[in-house]
Image: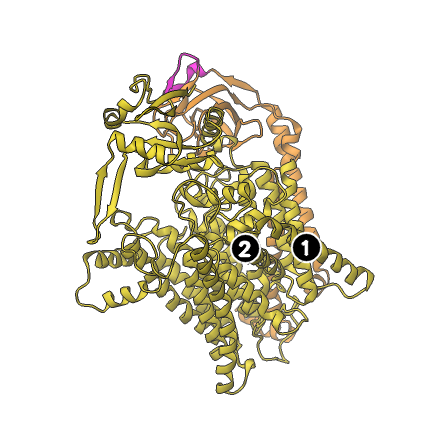
C-alpha cells in the first residue's frame, strides 16, 4: 500500500486538491441553502442602544471614544449573517460583532466575530449558526469618526456568487492547505514505513500484546 | 487596472534576468535574488552618476536581451533548460499574487517614517528622476539613508506616469520574496520541508511586527520601512552561501530508499564563481538597504569565514590551506560589503557634502568610525556616564520584558533559536552540518552582541535623551527575524539530510509543527480585515481626506516659491505629511513649525533656544523665497507674537480649518494676506 502511494505521489497531491475543492463546494451549497431558508430582516436603528456614539441631526453618528457600540437587545431569532452598510469618514479600524445567545448574557471576547469588508464598503459578519438574544456591533475603534449607517440586516440575501465564487482567502487556502496536508501525510508515511515489516517479528510481538 | 501593468512589466524584466542567471548555472531559487541585486547595484550606480533614467532604459533593454538570449539558447539551440525548482516557482507565484493583491487593495502610506523619509524619498526620486540625495526638496533634507529600496521602488514604477504608493509596497515585497526564495534554496528539493518553511517566511513579518491582537491595520507586507527587507536579505546572504554547500550524511548502504527524492545541493552546473555570485550580490544589496545593515552584513561575512575555516572540510583538507580558502571566500564577501558602503559614503561626501567619517550625526557629532571606540572606552572606564548606564541597563532589562514577536521577549526567541539549532545538530548525522550549526550559533550570537551595542551606541551618542528606547522593538526585531529564519533553515537542512527515516520524519514533523505554531499565532492575533488580505476600503480614509485638502490648496499656490508651514504643537507628522503630499512643490518648516524657535548647539553639548521675533521671521520668509504661509494649527502664543504680520490680524482664523496666506513684501515691511480658507 505504501509502495503504491510512493509511486503515485502526484495522484495523492491531486487527490488532496480535489478533496479540498469538493469540501469547499459542499460547504458553499450547505450555506447557500441554509442562508436562503432563513428570514431576512432589517434591524431598526432607533431600537439600538448607543454607547460612545452620538446621533447627529443629519442622521449620522459621531463616535466619542475608541469603542463606539450599537447594542440590539431583545432579539429571538436564528441568525447566521449580519450585514452592516455604512460609510466612515475616517478609517474605522477593527469591526467586531459580539453576540449573546441567552437574554441577560453579557458580551465578552470569546463570543465575537470579526467583520469581513465587501467590495461595496459594507461589512459582513458570519456568526456560528444559532438563535441569538442580543447583538453588539462595535463600529470600529476610531474616536471622533463620523459614521453614516444605512442599514443593519440580519440574514441578508446574498447572491449565489458570494458562495460559489472563491474569495481571496479561499484561493490562498486552496494554494496552501492541500499542499500542507500532503506534507503531513508524507511525514506520517515516513513513520509508517519505519514500522516493522517482517511478519516473523510481528508474530513475536503479537502474543506479548495479548498477554 | 492600468496601474498594474507597470509592476508586472518590472516583474517580467526581473524574471528575464533571473532566467538568464539560472541558464548560466546559478541555482534557480537564487536567481531572483541575483536579479534583484543587479537591479539595486545598477540603479544605485546610475543614481550616483545622476543618470537614473538612462540607467532604467538600459536595464530594461538588457532584460529584453536576456529574454531573447534565453529563448535563442533553449528554443533555437535546443540546449537543456535550467532546472526550475520549488524556490523559483514560489517566487513567481508569490510575486504575482502580491502584486495582484496590492493592486486590488491599493493600500497607502500610513506610518511616520514613510512620510519623514521612506515614502517621501521614493516619491521625490520618481517625480524628479534623480536620486533623492540631490533632488530639490527645499529644506535641510537628511538624505543620507542608503538607497537600495528607493532605487528598487523606482525600477518598479519606471514606466508609470504618476507616483503610486502601492507599487512601492509591491516592489519591496518582491525584493523580500526574492530573498525568501533564496532562503528556501538549500531545502527546495524536499518540499515537505520547503513548504512549511516558505509559509513561516511569509508569516514572519506578521510574527515579528504584530505583538498583540491587531486592532489597526497591520503594516506587514504593506510597509516601506527597511527593517523587514533588511532581515530577509540578512537571512538570504547566509542561505545563498549554504545553498551551494549543503552537507550530506555519509552514504549508508543499509538505509532503505526514501519515499521522497533525496536532498541534493541545489547548485547549478556553472563554475565556482556562480556559487559565490548570489552571496556577493545579496551582501551588497543588504549593505545598501539601511545604515545599520552594515552590522548584519559583517556578521554574515564572519559566519561565512568561520564556516569555511571550521565547518566545511571540502575546501581543503589541511588547516593552513583552509585558512587561505576561508580568507579568500571571507575576504571577497567582505569586499562585497565594504565596497558598496564606502562607495555610498564617498558619493554622499561628493553629492550631499556629508562626511560620515567625521560625524554620524545626532547630538554628540562623533565620527562614524570613532563611535565604537568611544563606546568601548566608556565601557571599560570606571567613570561611566549616567546615560550610558541607563541605556545599557534599560536595554538589558528589555531583553526579558519587551515583546518583539508573537511569542514574546527576545529571551524567549533566543531559547527557541537555540532549540532549533540544537535540534538541527542532533538530527543530522553529518559532522559538517553539526559543526556548521555550532559555528552559526557562535557567530550570530557574537554578532547579536555587536548589533546590540550598535543600537546602544545610537541611544547614547546619536539620539536625544528624550528619544531613549524610542523604536527599540523596531531596531531589534530584524536581527531576530533573520536569526529565526536561518535557524529554521538549518533545522530544515538537517531534516532533509537526516540519516534514518525516524529522524527524517521527526525533522519534517518538527518543521510542520513550527509552521503550525507560527500560523496559529498569526491567525489568533491578526484578523484578515487587519491584514493585506481583507483591507477595509476605508482604511486609508484619513489619507484621502488629507490628500483632497492638499489638492485644493495646491490650486491656490503661486507659480514659484515655497510654502512656510505653521503647525503649533505638531509632533512633526503633519509637517512630513504636507511635505510628502505637496511634492514637487517645496515647503519650509524651519524653527519647529509653530514654535518658531532657533536652536543653537553650544560647545558644552547643550542647546540654546532663541524665540524668533516677528521681524526676524518676516526677514526669514523673504530671504528664503517663501511666497506663502500655511496655517495648519496655530496656538495663542503664535497669535500674540506674529498676529501683527497678518493683514487680518488672524481675526478670521478658525482652528478647525487650514488657511493660506500670501507673503507680500512692501516698502520695508512684510504683510501676510489671506489667499484661501479650507472648505
Earlier residue among tags 1 and 2: 2
Residue B13 in the figure: left or right of residue B466: right
Which element type, helix, strand or loop, lies under badge 1?
Answer: helix
User: Where does the magenta region start and end?
Assistant: A45-59
Q: Position of residue B32 (x, y in %)?
A: 61, 58
Residue at image point 24% right, 32% down: B613
Inter-mark Cα distance, 1 to 2: 21 Å
Whole-percent x and y of residue B163? Answer: 55, 39
Q: Nearer the viewer, residue B93 or B59?
A: B59
**Chain holding disc 1:** B
Q: Is residue B356 above or below residue B560?
A: below
In the image, is B88 to the left or to the right of B218? right
Q: Label 2: chain? A: B
Q: Is disc 2 surrounded by few (<14), some (14 to 19) or many (20+) residues within 10 Å?
A: some
Q: Which residue is mark 2?
A: B49
Which quadrant of the figure has residue A92? top left
Q: Colour of chain A?
A: orange
**Image spot of residue B366 (x, y percent):** 30, 59
Residue B414 part of the magenta segment: no
At numbered mark 2, what does the secondary structure look like: helix, strand or loop? loop
Q: Is residue B123 visible?
A: yes
Label annotation for residue B63 = 1
Q: Nearer the viewer, residue B488 or B259?
A: B488
In the rendered view of the protein, which quadrant contains the N terminus of chain B? top right
Q: Residue at x 56, y 30 (%)?
A: A118
How many dots with numbers? Answer: 2
Report the mark closest to the observer, 1 or 2: 2
On screen, A45 above or below B194?
above
Height in image: A125 above or below A15? above
Q: Colour of chain B?
A: yellow
x then y, percent, for residue B468: 28, 50
Camera-side residue of B93 and B387: B387
Amino acid at each position: 500500500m505504501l509502495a503504491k502511494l510512493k509511486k503515485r505521489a502526484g495522484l495523492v497531491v491531486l487527490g488532496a486538491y480535489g478533496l479540498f475543492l469538493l469540501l469547499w463546494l459542499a460547504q458553499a451549497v450547505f450555506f447557500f441553502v441554509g442562508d436562503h431558508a432563513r428570514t431576512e430582516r432589517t434591524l431598526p436603528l432607533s431600537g439600538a442602544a448607543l454607547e460612545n456614539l452620538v446621533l447627529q441631526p443629519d442622521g449620522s453618528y459621531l463616535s466619542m471614544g475608541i469603542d463606539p457600540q450599537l447594542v440590539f437587545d431583545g432579539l429571538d431569532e436564528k441568525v447566521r449573517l449580519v450585514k452592516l452598510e455604512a460609510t466612515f469618514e475616517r478609517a474605522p479600524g477593527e469591526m467586531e460583532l459580539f453576540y449573546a445567545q441567552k437574554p441577560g448574557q453579557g458580551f465578552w471576547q470569546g463570543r465575537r466575530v470579526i467583520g469581513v469588508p465587501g467590495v461595496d464598503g459594507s461589512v459582513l459578519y458570519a456568526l456560528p449558526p444559532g438563535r441569538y438574544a442580543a447583538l453588539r456591533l462595535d463600529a470600529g475603534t476610531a474616536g471622533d469618526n463620523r459614521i453614516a449607517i444605512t442599514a443593519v440586516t440580519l440574514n441578508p440575501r446574498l447572491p449565489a456568487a458570494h458562495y460559489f465564487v472563491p474569495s481571496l482567502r479561499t484561493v490562498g487556502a486552496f494554494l496552501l492547505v492541500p499542499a500542507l496536508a500532503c506534507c503531513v501525510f508524507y511525514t506520517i508515511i515516513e513513520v509508517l514505513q519505519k514500522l516493522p515489516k517482517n511478519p516473523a517479528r510481528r508474530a513475536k510481538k503479537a502474543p506479548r500484546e495479548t498477554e | 487596472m492600468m496601474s498594474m501593468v507597470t509592476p508586472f512589466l518590472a516583474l517580467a524584466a526581473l524574471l528575464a534576468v533571473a532566467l538568464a542567471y539560472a541558464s548560466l548555472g546559478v541555482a534557480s531559487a537564487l536567481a531572483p535574488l541575483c536579479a534583484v541585486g543587479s537591479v539595486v547595484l545598477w540603479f544605485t550606480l546610475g543614481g550616483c552618476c545622476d543618470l537614473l533614467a538612462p540607467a532604467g532604459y538600459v536595464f530594461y533593454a538588457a532584460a529584453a536581451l536576456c529574454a531573447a538570449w534565453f529563448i535563442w539558447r533553449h528554443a533555437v539551440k535546443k540546449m537543456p533548460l535550467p532546472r526550475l525548482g520549488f524556490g523559483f516557482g514560489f517566487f513567481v507565484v508569490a510575486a504575482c499574487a502580491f502584486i495582484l493583491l496590492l493592486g486590488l487593495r491599493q493600500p497607502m502610506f500610513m506610518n511616520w517614517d514613510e512620510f519623514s523619509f521612506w515614502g517621501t524619498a521614493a516619491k521625490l526620486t520618481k517625480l524628479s528622476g534623480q536620486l533623492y540625495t540631490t533632488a530639490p526638496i527645499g529644506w535641510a533634507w537628511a538624505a543620507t539613508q542608503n538607497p537600495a529600496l528607493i532605487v528598487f521602488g523606482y525600477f518598479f514604477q519606471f514606466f508609470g506616469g504618476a507616483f503610486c504608493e502601492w507599487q512601492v509596497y509591491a516592489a519591496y515585497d518582491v525584493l523580500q520574496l526574492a530573498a525568501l526564495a533564496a532562503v528556501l534554496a538549500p531545502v527546495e528539493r524536499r518540499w515537505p520541508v520547503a513548504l512549511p518553511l516558505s509559509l513561516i517566511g511569509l508569516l514572519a513579518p506578521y510574527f515579528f511586527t504584530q505583538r498583540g491582537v491587531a486592532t489597526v491595520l497591520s503594516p506587514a507586507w504593506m510597509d516601506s520601512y527597511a527593517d523587514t527587507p533588511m532581515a530577509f536579505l540578512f537571512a538570504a546572504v547566509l542561505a545563498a552561501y549554504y545553498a551551494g554547500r549543503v552537507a550530506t550524511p555519509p552514504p549508508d548502504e543499509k538505509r532503505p530508499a526514501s519515499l521522497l527524492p533525496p536532498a541534493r545541493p541545489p547548485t547549478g552546473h556553472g563554475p565556482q564563481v556562480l556559487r559565490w555570485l548570489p552571496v556577493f550580490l545579496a551582501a551588497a544589496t543588504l549593505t545598501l538597504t539601511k545604515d545599520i545593515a552594515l552590522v548584519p552584513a559583517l556578521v554574515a561575512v564572519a559566519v561565512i569565514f568561520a564556516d569555511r575555516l571550521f565547518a566545511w572540510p571540502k575546501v581543503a583538507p589541511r588547516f593552513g590551506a583552509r585558512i587561505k580558502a576561508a580568507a579568500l571566500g571571507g575576504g571577497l564577501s567582505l569586499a562585497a560589503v565594504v565596497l558598496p558602503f564606502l562607495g555610498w559614503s564617498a558619493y554622499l561626501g561628493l553629492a550631499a557634502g556629508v562626511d560620515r567619517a567625521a560625524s554620524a550625526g545626532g547630538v554628540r557629532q562623533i565620527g562614524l568610525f570613532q563611535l565604537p571606540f568611544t563606546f568601548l572606552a566608556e565601557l571599560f572606564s570606571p567613570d561611566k556616564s549616567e546615560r550610558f548606564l541607563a541605556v545599557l541597563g534599560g536595554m538589558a532589562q528589555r531583553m526579558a520584558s519587551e515583546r518583539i514577536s508573537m511569542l514574546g521577549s527576545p529571551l524567549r526567541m533566543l531559547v527557541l533559536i537555540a532549540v532549533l539549532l540544537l535540534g538541527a545538530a542532533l538530527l543530522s548525522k553529518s559532522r559538517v552540518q553539526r559543526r556548521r550549526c555550532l559555528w552559526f550559533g557562535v557567530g550570530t550570537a557574537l554578532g547579536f552582541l555587536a548589533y546590540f551595542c550598535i543600537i546602544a551606541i545610537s541611544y547614547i551618542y546619536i539620539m536625544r535623551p528624550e528619544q531613549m528606547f524610542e523604536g527599540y522593538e523596531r531596531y531589534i526585531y530584524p536581527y531576530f527575524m533573520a536569526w529565526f529564519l536561518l535557524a529554521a533553515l538549518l533545522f530544515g537542512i538537517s531534516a532533509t539530510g537526516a540519516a534514518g527515516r525516524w529522524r527524517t520524519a521527526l525533522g519534517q514533523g518538527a518543521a510542520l509543527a513550527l509552521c503550525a505554531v507560527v500560523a496559529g499565532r498569526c491567525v489568533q492575533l491578526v484578523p484578515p480585515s487587519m491584514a493585506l488580505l481583507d483591507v477595509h476600503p476605508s482604511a486609508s480614509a484619513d489619507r484621502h481626506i488629507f490628500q483632497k485638502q492638499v489638492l485644493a490648496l495646491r490650486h491656490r499656490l503661486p507659480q514659484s516659491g515655497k510654502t512656510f508651514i505653521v503647525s503649533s504643537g505638531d509632533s512633526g507628522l503633519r509637517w512630513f505629511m504636507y511635505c510628502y503630499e505637496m511634492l514637487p512643490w517645496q515647503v519650509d518648516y524651519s524653527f519647529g513649525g509653530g514654535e518658531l524657535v532657533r536652536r543653537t548647539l553650544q560647545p558644552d553639548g547643550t542647546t540654546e533656544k532663541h524665540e524668533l521675533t516677528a521681524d526676524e521671521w518676516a526677514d526669514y520668509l523673504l530671504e528664503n523665497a517663501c511666497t506663502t504661509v500655511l496655517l495648519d494649527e496655530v496656538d495663542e502664543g503664535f497669535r500674540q507674537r506674529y498676529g501683527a504680520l497678518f493683514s487680518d490680524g488672524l481675526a478670521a482664523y478658525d482652528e478647525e480649518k487650514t488657511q493660506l496666506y500670501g507673503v507680500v513684501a512692501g516698502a520695508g515691511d512684510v504683510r501676510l494676506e489671506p489667499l484661501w480658507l479650507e472648505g
